[in-house]
Image (cartoon, rainbow, N blue to C red):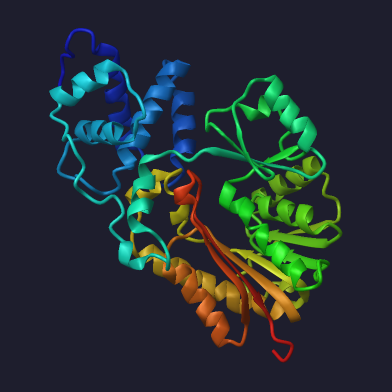
């Protein structure tokens, strides 16, 4: 530990010290973004530039995962910065030398490659941990012209892929666009889940073969809004175990103009919930998971991850599937979704459903790690009429 910063490096040394203090205090019990927001709210001495610098250092530290545990906090922070920063001020390079930061990174930030889903590129996936994913918007139906016009008039750089817009993750889109009304903030891979609804229509001559839909782990409602936009006239039931989430979802649906829905606080893993006795044309199960496909965005999870979590989540997922599959009408559909990269949470669960007599209509690993986006898994299964 250096106690007297070299001349001209005092401010950067202070940033480094602040990051160390935060990392020592943070225990991984909440998202790092939430912790930092509360921390800076308490510590009024940090200006906006200070907060940005310290935040970058904290995230750089966690991008190393559990590697280089023999290095000091300062060395690990600086090594993470060296590996992940696109550009940096010259003083940081001086500190690399002062702290004797390794020139290269020979280790593995993701050592669980033998547990990955099929068709993953483990090297490319590991490289993605050094890159912060982009911000993605989905243009809602009927808003294309006005959204593009607003972005162009504001000279805000973006790339377009269909109704998906890619922007810098620092873009302040809420100051320009009506969130949930004109656009939805939704990761690219999450948007691509919409292709499963296209598959549903193709099975029925281009028409929607489902009307009654239950999103049983609705969370913030992003998939539900996507479902309504893709399928049109549907009767939507949404549920989540957390009452606060359902309250936020209702507010979001109001902003999105979605009116034909029923929202419930319910535990999809509990067979005694009244909702599970109902029958639906389609059940969407975006189940709780390790979230490993999103760790480029939340690298603190990479650092605190324990492999026992895979088994814990896989067990919970299986319990949810056992509970909700009877709620699908004979001939109806189940859309199973995770943001995990682990086979036990993805293909293994689909294999179990197949053993129970379900037919897999389509299955996809959405490789967001190649696109500066999250990685997700989705499978559309159909219930045999005899089940």
User: Depth check: 368 or 52 in front?
Assistant: 368
Task: Point out residue 348 in the picture as x, y percentages from the top left corner.
Answer: 47, 75
Which residue is at a point 16% across and 39% down the rendered structure image?
71
Q: Is residue 69 among the parts visible in the rendering? A: yes
Task: Point out residue 37 in the picture as x, y percentages from the top left corner.
Answer: 49, 31
Position of 74 relative to 13 (above/below) = below
Task: Point out residue 200 in the picture as x, y percentages from the top left corner.
Answer: 73, 68
Picture quarter containing residue 332?
bottom right
Which residue is at a point 49% across and 37% down the rendered structure image?
34
Picture quarter containing residue 230?
bottom right
Picture quarter containing residue 223?
bottom right
Q: Is residue 336 left or right of residue 251?
A: left
Position of 236 relative to 147 (above/below) = below
User: Depth check: 32 or 153 in front?
Assistant: 153
Position of 13 relative to 367 (above/below) = above
User: Depth check: 34 or 120 in front?
Assistant: 120
Task: Point out residue 179 in the picture as x, y percentages from the top left corner.
Answer: 71, 36
The image shows a total of numbered marks equal to 0
Which residue is at a point 83% across and 57% down the rendered structure image?
232
Q: Is residue 224 left or right of residue 74?
A: right
The furthest residue to the top: 7
Which residue is at a point 36% across and 29% down the rendered structure image?
86
């Amino acid at each position: 530990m250096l106690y007297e910063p070299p001349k001209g490096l005092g401010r950067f040394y202070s940033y480094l010290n602040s990051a160390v203090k935060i990392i020592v205090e943070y225990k991984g019990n909440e998202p790092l973004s939430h912790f930092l927001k509360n921390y800076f709210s308490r510590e009024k001495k940090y200006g906006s530039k200070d907060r940005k610098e310290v935040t970058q250092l904290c995230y750089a530290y966690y991008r190393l995962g559990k590697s280089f545990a023999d290095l000091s906090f300062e060395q690990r922070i600086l090594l993470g910065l060296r590996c992940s920063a696109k550009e940096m001020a010259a003083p940081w390079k001086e500190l690399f030398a002062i702290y004797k930061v390794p020139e290269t990174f020979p280790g593995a930030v993701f050592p669980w490659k033998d547990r990955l889903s099929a068709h993953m590129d483990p090297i490319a996936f590991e490289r993605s941990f050094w890159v912060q994913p982009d911000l993605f918007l989905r243009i809602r139906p009927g808003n294309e012209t006005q959204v593009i016009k607003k972005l162009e008039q504001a000279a805000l750089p973006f790339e377009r892929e269909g109704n998906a817009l890619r922007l810098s993750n620092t873009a302040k889109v809420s100051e320009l666009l009506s969130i949930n009304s004109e656009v939805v903030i939704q990761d690219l891979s999450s948007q691509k889940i919409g292709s499963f609804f296209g598959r549903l229509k193709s099975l029925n001559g281009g028409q929607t073969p489902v009307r009654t839909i239950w999103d049983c782990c609705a969370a913030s409602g992003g998939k539900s809004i996507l479902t309504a936009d893709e399928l049109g006239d549907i009767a939507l039931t949404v549920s989540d175990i957390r009452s606060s989430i359902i309250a936020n979802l209702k507010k979001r649906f109001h902003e999105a103009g979605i009116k034909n829905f029923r929202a419930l606080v319910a535990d999809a893993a509990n067979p005694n919930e009244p909702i599970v006795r109902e029958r639906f044309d389609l059940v969407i199960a975006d189940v709780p998971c390790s979230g490993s496909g999103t760790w480029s965005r939340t690298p603190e999870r990479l650092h605190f991850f324990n492999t026992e979590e895979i088994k814990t989540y896989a067990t919970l997922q299986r319990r949810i599937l056992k509970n909700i599959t009877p709620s699908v009408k004979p001939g109806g559909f189940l859309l199973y979704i995770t943001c995990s990269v682990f086979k036990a949470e993805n293909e293994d669960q689909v294999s179990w459903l197949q053993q129970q007599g379900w037919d897999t209509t389509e299955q996809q690993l959405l490789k967001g790690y190649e696109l500066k986006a999250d990685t997700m898994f989705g499978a559309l299964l159909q219930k045999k009429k005899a089940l």
